[in-house]
Every structure is written in C-alpha cells, then in structure tokens.
Image (spheres, grey):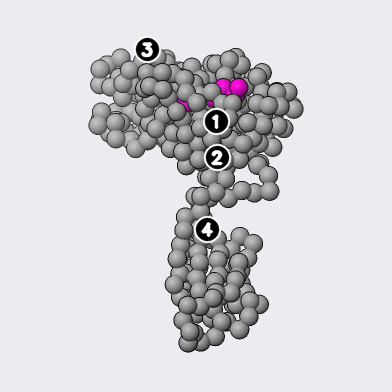
Amino acid sequence: MLRFAIPSKGSGYEATLGLLESCGLRVIRANPRQYTATLRGLADTEVLLQRPAEIIAKVAEGDIDIGVTGLDLVREMRPDDEDLLIVNDDLGFWRVELVFAVPQGWIDIASWDDLADLAAEMQSSGRRLRIATKYLHIVREFCYAQGITAFDLVESHGSTEAAPGQGYADIIADITETGTAIRDNKLKIVGGPILRSQAVLIGSRRSLRGNQSKLELLRQLLELIEARRRGRLYYSLTANIVGTSVEAVGRMVTERRELAGLRGPTIAPVWSKFADAEGQWYAVNVVVPQNELLPAVDHLRRIGAVSISTTPVQHVFNERSSTYEGLIASLQR
C-alpha cells in the first residue's frame, strides 16, 4: 500500500482534509483517536496521522512513502538529504514567513545590515547578540551569509515572541503569518523574509524508486491535486447568442482571442422553446481565467449574448502531469 502521512491536528490537518476533499478524496477515520485512516477515492492507500516533524524523519528513512509537511521544517531538519524529495513544492496553504524581529524601541535597527553592525558593536563591548529561534540551522546559515557573525542562538521551545521581554534573548527569528503575535509582544520585523514557507508534499526516494504500484497510486494523487489547483483559477461561461451559423458565431467570439477559452469556444445550436424565435440561437461555452471573468462577460454582451451563466471549474487536466514527470526525473537521477 501507499503510505501517506498528513498532519495529525491543527490548521495543517484541516487544510489537508480540505484539499483532498476538493479533489474528490476523503479521509475516513474509525474514531478521532485513531492515527490511521483510509483514503476513499484512492485504493490501496493508508493514511497515517503524524506530527509534521515526524513526517519528515519517517519519509526520509523510508518508513512512509509520502507526506504533507511545511517547507520550513524540511529546510531546517533535512536540507541536503538525498532520500527526501519535494514532490509538490506548493499545496496552497500553510503560508508563513521566517523573519527577524527586534524590540520596537530599537528605532535605528531596520535592516539586516543594521543587525550586522549591532552584533559587531555588542561584541566590541564584551557581549554577543542573542537570537531566540526554533530554526537553528536556517538562521545560522542565513546570518553568516548576511555578514552577521557575532551571535549566539538560543533554542526556543515555546512562545519565541516572548523571549526578548523575558530577558533570555535580544531578538528573535520566527515564523509568522500575519505578524500579529510579533506586534503584540512589542516587536517589529526587520529586513525581508529569511524564508517563505508553505505546505509541501514530500516523498521517499528509498521506498518509491522502482516501485511501480506505489508510483501509479502517487501519479493519480498528483494528477488530482494538480488539476484541482489549476481548476480553481478558471470559470466556465455559458451564453446564448443569435447567429447565422456556427462559423459566424465562432468568429464573433474569437475576436478577442484571450477571452475565447482555453482552446476556443464550444458552440452548439439551441432548440428554442419559443415558437416565434427570431433567427437561430446558439449556446456558447468558454473557459476563462478568473481575472478575465468580467472582461469575458462584457465581450459576450457586446456581441449580443444573453443569459450568461458561470460555473467554477473543478479540475483542469493537462496532457500529462508535470509534477509526476518531475518526480520520475528526480528518482532517476
């Protein structure tokens, strides 16, 4: 069976369930206390509920085939592990940024260069800049790359934002989604993001390589996720237009090529329910990007369309799955 790990609780769990359900897949648990489940809609797949950090370790070791976790944890725990593959680098949720934050009273500190200067000044006075963080590896590498060399990392296991106020660190490096917790603790963000992170799908080179049955199951999962995320970007429009022929209506619709659908409009005669209908009615269907929805509606109106309706697109499948092809290429290297 394909062993598929997802976060066991919290926002990651809820968002993963939402993504899978939007793809037509449903996690079935016998009871809320069980840490195993089945995935309705994808046969021969066992779902394991784990902590995100455990998912990374078990996938890298081959005990689990694939799993949903955060990119920040992957970069912190297994940055150079060849047995750990990032199969899909953006599942569309869990978006956070790893940032530096300093006390709001430090009005002269606004950039990474300012932090480097501050660290050097503190060292000349006999002490070192203390940085509280859960991300020891990422922050250490980043500091050295930015010329911040005189510092001590204080490993944080709780509310990192409270560290400067409690006196055991000078500044922090932590993840944030909105910055609210940072501001509530009288801190401010300096510089840009150290790392932008989101939910990713990781895979085990050890367990997937050469296993065609697991790869076929994974291909189906990747196809559904990819097509669903692509489908969210589109709307399907249907309208009725009077015309002299299919060709004449097609020419009118394709006057604006960018609004004429993915490949072009689908046009079919309408059997009018009105006996005194003037001319031949045609039903026109086009699929357009969300940001082109109103321009497409206006274009159809301009050429005489009426009764325009829209439907959100559920899935858009391409000729092949680029995500799956990328995985196969990674496994062959």
* Inter-mark Cα distance, 4 to 1: 26 Å
Any mark on residue 225, and which?
A: 2
Residue with the most extreme top position: 126
Residues at badges 1 and 2 in contact (C-beta under 8 Å)? Answer: yes
Mark 3 crowd level (few <14, some 14–19, many ≥20, 10 Å Cα): few
Q: Residue at x 59, y 26 (%)?
A: 44
- Identify the residue at horizontal 55%, vertical 61% (top origin): 287
Q: Amino acid at mark 2?
A: Ile
How packed mark 4 is, by other alpha carbons closer than 10 Å (few <14, some 14-19, many 20 or more), is some
| Highlighted magenta segment, given as a residue range | 1-7
Quadrant of the image containing the N terminus: top right
Few, some or many C-alpha atoms within 10 Å of disc 1 (few <14, some 14-19, many ≥20)?
A: many
Indicate which disc residue 201 carries: 1
In the picture provided, is 9 more to the left or to the right than 146? Answer: left
Give the side of residue 41 with respect to residue 214, left or right: left
Q: CA distance from mark 1 to mark 2?
A: 11 Å
Residue 289: mark: 4
